[in-house]
Image: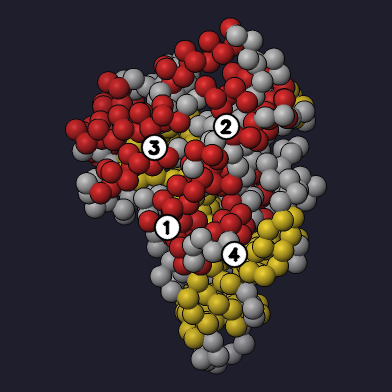
């Protein structure tokens, strides 16, 4: 692939901001030198002028669901379409979720998801494992999966009858995680209690999407978060809360971290930027049905989450990208319409993998809530450290993969279904004008987005065997 030189840009990592040139040899960064001081002796094979632009590590989205079976259909994006859309938005690595269902071997689930992704992804990818059936065999397979580079296991305190694990099963999995060094990733909502409220609402004839947000009460996310933290405490396992949405949950994470515990959490753009009102307006609100649900802005959830990002009580912003079409999908057929007369039957999930980097830059950096270093930290560096990919991924440094994004911090544009590349028929942020535009994306030294065109190919991405977390205290 030869050499490439990115010159005259402002290089931003989690810890530094500098006017620097970046030299790339084949797939790796080999030098980072203050602008104009790099003497190559010969011309680089490719030179990219980044004057006036930010040069940042490629984003890492550690929570995506490509092709996930859910609610009688499948997430609309395949590994090909979803990973390509991620690249358009400045994300160069995803960590998706392989699925073990009841009665199935976890290893079989892993191999099935590897087969889905192999040769399809535009960018590098790894897997967490959804462990939906904790038994003696699964506990043994957790050790085998760690050897395969799957070092995190997702559990659900929600969705009884589908992925739900009771406290005893959670304890067994946490004991195994404490033993083999893996991370438990937890969906913390009290699903047993929520189902009571769901059934009562439906019996009252409350079928619109807004009731999805009303019945999944924020205090039940807080309760489940507290319980999972205490189960982690007695087992010695680290726990990472996925898609944290509620101030009650964040309070529990903050208390645990203040106690010095290995407790971590992510939130998502939808919980920072959208709210319960999006679920209103009749069935149009189905676009915004996800779990946990969007929260009431008047209660202060959104501002509390932003504060959590500034205080490091929240460490990561991911997407929980799991798109379902409002109309019929060309491959999977009817999707959100499955719940037209019953909010509980609406497939849970929203599109977002393409929008994350730009949304957080706009609302965070341009909006004055966080600085550019923290932006890089929560979208790239900490995800890499949290899930065993650093320093190969998540930074710009000699020896790291040349996964690099050039972002124009002053360029405004409007998000729309008309221009996005996700395989879904609506945008959750339709018409939102934002400042900050991803212009050039490099994956392992290969330019895959440039001049408004995609230059990559499916199969460019490679499977990443992840190490264990680097974030333990």
Q: Which of marks 2 and 4 is in front?
A: 4
Mark seen at residue 249: 3
Relative image position of residue 418 (x, y in whole percent): 80, 47
Q: Is mark 2 on a helix, strand or loop?
A: loop
Residue contact between numbered discs 1 and 2, judged by CB atoms under 8 Å: no
Q: Earlier in the sequence, mark 3 or mark 4?
A: 3
Q: In this view, does 56 lie to the left or right of 89?
A: left
**Residue located beneath label 4 in the image:** 366
Q: Is residue 246 visible?
A: yes
Q: Distance between the residues labelled 3 and 1?
A: 17 Å
Q: Which of 18 and 395 is in front in this view?
A: 18
Q: Distance between the residues labelled 3 and 2?
A: 17 Å
- The residue that appears at 77% across and 27% down in the rendered structure is 328
Mark seen at residue 136: none
**Residue located beneath label 1 in the image:** 310
- The residue that appears at 29% across and 35% down in the rendered structure is 229
- The residue that appears at 46% across and 47% down in the rendered structure is 305
Colour theme: secondary structure
Q: Which of marks 3 and 2 is nearer the N terminus?
A: 3
Q: Which of marks 3 and 1 is nearer the N terminus?
A: 3
- The residue that appears at 55% across and 90% down in the rendered structure is 36
Q: Nearer the viewer, residue 336 or 423?
A: 336
Residue with the most extreme front position: 298
Q: Nearer the viewer, mark 1 or mark 2?
A: 1
Q: Is mark 1 on a helix, strand or loop?
A: helix
Relative image position of residue 311 (x, y in whole percent): 38, 56
Relative image position of residue 448 (x, y in whole percent): 66, 61
**Residue located beneath label 2 in the image:** 290
Q: Is mark 3 on a helix, strand or loop?
A: helix
User: For residue 340, what is the image quadrant?
Assistant: top right
Say few, some or many: other residues with alpha carbon within 10 Å of mark 4 (under 14 / 14 to 19 / 20 or more).
Answer: some
User: For residue 151, what is the image quadrant?
Assistant: top left
């Amino acid at each position: 692939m030869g050499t490439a030189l990115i010159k005259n840009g402002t290089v931003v990592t989690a810890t530094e901001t500098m006017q620097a040139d970046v030299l790339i040899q084949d797939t790796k960064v080999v030098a980072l030198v203050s602008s104009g001081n790099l003497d190559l002796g010969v011309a680089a094979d490719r030179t990219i002028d980044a004057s006036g632009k930010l040069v940042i590590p490629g984003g890492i989205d550690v929570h995506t669901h490509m092709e996930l079976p859910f609610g009688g259909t499948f997430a609309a994006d395949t590994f090909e379409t979803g990973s390509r859309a991620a690249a358009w938005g400045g994300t160069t690595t995803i960590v998706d979720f392989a699925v073990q269902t009841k009665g199935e071997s976890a290893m079989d689930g892993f191999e099935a998801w590897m087969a889905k992704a192999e040769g399809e992804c535009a960018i590098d990818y790894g897997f967490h494992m959804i462990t939906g059936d904790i038994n003696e065999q699964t506990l043994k397979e957790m050790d085998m999966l760690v050897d395969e580079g799957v070092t995190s296991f997702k559990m659900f305190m929600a969705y009884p009858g589908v992925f739900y694990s009771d406290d005893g099963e959670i304890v067994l999995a946490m004991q195994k995680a404490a033993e083999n060094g893996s991370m438990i990733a937890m969906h913390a909502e009290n699903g047993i209690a929520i189902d009571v409220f769901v059934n009562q609402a439906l019996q009252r004839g409350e079928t619109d999407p807004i009731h999805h947000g009303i019945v999944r009460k924020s205090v039940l996310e807080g309760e489940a978060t507290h319980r999972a933290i205490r189960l982690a405490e007695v087992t010695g396992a680290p726990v990472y809360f996925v898609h944290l949405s509620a101030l009650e949950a964040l309070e529990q994470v903050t208390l645990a971290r203040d106690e010095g515990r290995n407790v971590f959490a992510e939130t998502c753009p939808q919980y920072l930027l959208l709210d319960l009102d999006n679920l209103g307006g009749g069935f149009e609100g189905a676009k915004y049905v996800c779990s946990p649900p969007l929260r009431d802005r008047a209660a202060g959830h959104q501002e509390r989450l932003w504060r959590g990002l500034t205080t490091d009580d929240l460490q990561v912003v991911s997407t929980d990208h799991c798109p379902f079409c409002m109309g019929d999908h060309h491959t999977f057929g009817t999707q959100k319409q499955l719940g037209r007369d019953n909010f509980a039957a609406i497939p849970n999930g929203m599109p977002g993998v393409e929008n994350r980097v730009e949304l957080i830059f706009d609302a965070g950096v341009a909006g004055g809530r966080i600085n550019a270093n923290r932006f890089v930290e929560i979208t790239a560096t900490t995800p890499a450290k949290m899930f065993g990919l650093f320093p190969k991924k998540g930074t710009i440094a000699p020896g790291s993969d040349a996964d690099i994004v050039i972002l124009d911090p002053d360029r405004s544009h409007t998000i729309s279904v008309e221009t996005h590349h996700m395989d879904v028929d609506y945008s959750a942020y339709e018409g939102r004008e934002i400042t900050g535009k991803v212009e050039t994306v490099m994956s392992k030294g290969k330019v895959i987005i440039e001049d408004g065109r995609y230059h990559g190919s499916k199969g460019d991405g490679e499977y990443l065997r992840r190490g264990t977390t680097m974030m333990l205290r």
